Image (spheres, rainbow, N blue to C red):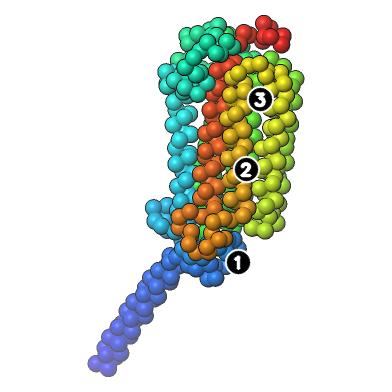
Amino acid sequence: MNSMKKRGTKKSEKSEITESVIMKEKKKKKKRCRLMKYEELPVYLQDNEFIRDYYRCEWPLKDVALSLFSWHNETLNIWTHLIGFVIFVTLTVTSLTEKTAMETLLAGFSRPADEGRWPMMKKNGSADSFPVSYTSQISNPSFLGAYGDGYEVAIWPWFVFLGGAMICLVFSSVSHLFACHSHKFTLFFWRLDYSGISIMIICSFFAPLYYTFCCQPYWCLFYLSSITIVGILVIITLFTPALTSGKFRSFRAALFLAMGFSGVIPAAHAVSLYFHHPQVLVALVYEIAMGLLYAAGAVFYVTRFPERWKPGAFDLVGQSHQIFHVLVVAAALAHSIATLVIMDWRRGLPPCSADILG
Ligand SMILES: [Zn+2]
């Protein structure tokens, strides 16, 4: 009898312990998945002291993934580049499949209503030379052979840029979503983010350089290989552990800007060769717009305005990093337009042998 009583007490004690363990675990999880204030964060997550609240910190992976759909101080950072990514996926799919859509895009950006003002635009190939599907061209890219069979301008450099833009935007979104999971994740994802930006900058150069210099193969190779080498060096530099810290924000911004502005030399070269071609100047205006948008983005990134002005007021909406993200997407779109204009211009020129520059 006594032993039965003892067994019963033991059993209820056991279930009590289990219950309390479950409760503790639940509490722990709830604690782990709450949004934290800046002061509560471990040092490795303390990056911007002007964003005061709504931090996710070391949440389990599943909760981090689901936080894509909830409000915290990274929500808009994730979504600004996710929407940018969707825009570039749409642009890629359109380029691959829709002949008419692409032609409308080209015509809309590079040809004013009065065609007579644009003598260089007289087509030698007409719209018929535009391929119905570009997939055939990508599968058979002829580097430095802008005028291959069928007298068409290669389309692959345009896809190199679109690919670079998509990589940058998706890397950025994923990094902003997952970096808060652990110290290891923070280190890995911020490096991934920086390499994405470098990849986009390198890829941006391909199309304009290719279409401008495809009849001067040595210049074309020289510029493309120089920017690729510089880009790889920048990526290697960014992977140096010390440079991932917030202290080197200005250095990173300067590095990206320097990389971007190295395009000034080939652009000046192109303008000196083709200054009498209005479309080259139109493309240049869009490229200058791109440069200004990137520069404005860098100013927000470095100065942390407006949250510096009113700490805590822009934790969820309007912080500098969100503005920087929107400016990056706008700059990439300006570059897309410049590239479409320059592609259209090249299509309107005679083949290299008959080119005005020989
Ligand atoms: Zn970002």
**Within 8 Å: ligand 1 and the Cβ of disc 1?**
no
Query: In terms of image quadrants, where is residue 306?
Result: bottom right
Query: Residue drawn 47% across and 22% down?
Result: 108
State the SS at label 3: helix
Relative height, residue 12 to residue 318 (above, below): below
Relative height, residue 74 to residue 217 (above, below): below
Q: Amino acid type of disc 2? A: Ala
Q: Determine the CA span between mark 3 and mark 1.
A: 44 Å
Q: Determine the CA span between mark 2 and mark 1.
A: 30 Å
The residue where tag 1 is placed is 43
Residue 209 shows which numbered tag?
3
Between residues 302 and 70, which one lies in front from this camera angle? Answer: 302
State the SS at label 2: helix
**Within 8 Å: ligand 1 and the Cβ of disc 2?**
no
Residue 97 is left or right of residue 282, and the answer is left
Q: Determine the CA span between mark 3 and mark 2.
A: 21 Å
Classify mark 3: residues with Cα within 10 Å, few (<14), some (14-19) or many (20+). many
Q: Which residue lies furthest to the left in this view?
A: 1
Residue 209 is left or right of residue 106, and the answer is right
- Any part of residue 207 in sight: no
Residue 295 shows which numbered tag?
2
Between residues 63 and 107, which one lies in front from this camera angle? Answer: 107
Classify mark 1: residues with Cα within 10 Å, few (<14), some (14-19) or many (20+). few
Q: Amino acid type of disc 1? A: Val
Which of disc 2 and disc 3 is earlier in sequence? 3
Which of disc 1 and disc 3 is earlier in sequence? 1
Relative height, residue 20 to residue 213 (above, below): below
